[in-house]
Amino acid sequence: MARKGRMLYEGKAKRVYETDAPDLCIVEYKDDATAFNGAKRGVIAGKGAVNNRMSNVFFRVLEDHNVATHFVEELSERETLVRRVAIVPLEVVVRNLAAGSMAKRLGLAEGLELARPIVEFYYKNDALGDPLITDDHAEILGLATPADLAAIRQEALRVNDVLRPFLAERGVLLVDFKLEFGRDSAGRLLLADEISPDTCRFWDVKTRERLDKDRFRRDLGGVEAAYQEMWRRVSEVEAR
Ligand code: TMP
């Protein structure tokens, strides 16, 4: 089994460690939560375990649908072995319904269904507050080539095509979500980071109750219960 070596990186919600294999890392999920670029901080008890296990369910389902991901093996409740990648410094957001920053920026009602899923690119840069950028910006900043962007866009929409019905079966509307991609040492583009209530908007299909991090961002209460409810829905049906 891979052993945890030196810590390579500590983010807001995860730590990443080296292992004895140069092309593998261990990701450790924390209960710490931040919002608004770190301006709001808190702890969501049990979040690390939910986000780790839920991300891994999604990565396995995506691998079954030929989406290449960094996932290798779940090691414990909070730890997963992943392929080591250089992260492309883009936050790739897919939206099915208008919500959050898009609703605000464009003056749309939250919950408005979009005519088709859309993809947005944000520059992953905390000092700048992760600004929304155009393809041209990404290219002139040297973040990604036009070919990279086309591949990332296509892969992000495929993730949506797989996860939307998977979640619908579990009574969950996939409103929007954020992905990150990376390249392994061979240059292969892999889906990386996490897919969890921290990085997605999940609404109950019938009541439109929010089952995600917006409960923390917007002080709606019931934060821990929402994470546990999402895990129940994702894991129970999987175990059938
Ligand atoms: P937004 O509407 O605030 O731009 O968020 C779009 C999606 O991206 C939503 O599902 C939450 C997720 N997200 C992150 O994962 N990290 C972030 O830092 C932000 C701002 C959003």
Image (spheres, rainbow, N blue to C red):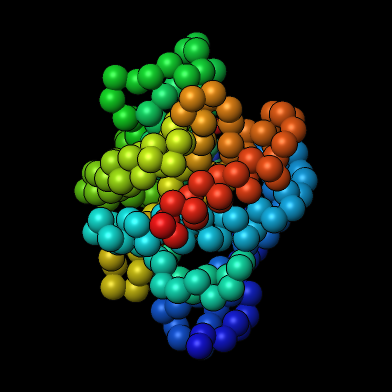
Q: Looking at the picture, how far across and down is residue 133, in whole percent? A: 42, 33
Q: Looking at the picture, tell me which residue is in the foreground, 108 or 188.
A: 108
Count numbered badges in the picture: 0
Residue 226 versus residue 190 in the image, above or below: above
Q: Looking at the picture, how far across and down is residue 68, in whole percent? A: 30, 61
Residue at (25%, 56%) from the top-left corner?
A: 65
Q: Quadrant of residue 116?
A: top left
Q: Looking at the picture, tell me which residue is in the foreground, 116 or 148.
A: 116
Q: Looking at the picture, tell me which residue is in the foreground, 201 or 70.
A: 201
For the C terminus, the quadrant is: bottom left
Residue at (58%, 36%) from the top-left corner?
A: 211
Q: In this view, does 132 lie to the left or right of 216?
A: left
Q: Looking at the picture, how far across and down is residue 160, in whole percent? A: 33, 41
Residue at (64%, 58%) from the top-left corner?
A: 48
> What is the residue that sits farthest to the front in this orientation?
240
Residue at (40%, 65%) from the top-left corner?
A: 70
Q: In this view, does 218 lie to the left or right of 173?
A: right
Q: Looking at the picture, how far across and down is residue 39, in whole percent? A: 74, 38
Residue 135 versus residue 28 in the image, above or below: above
Visible residue check, residue 74: yes
Visible residue check, residue 105: no
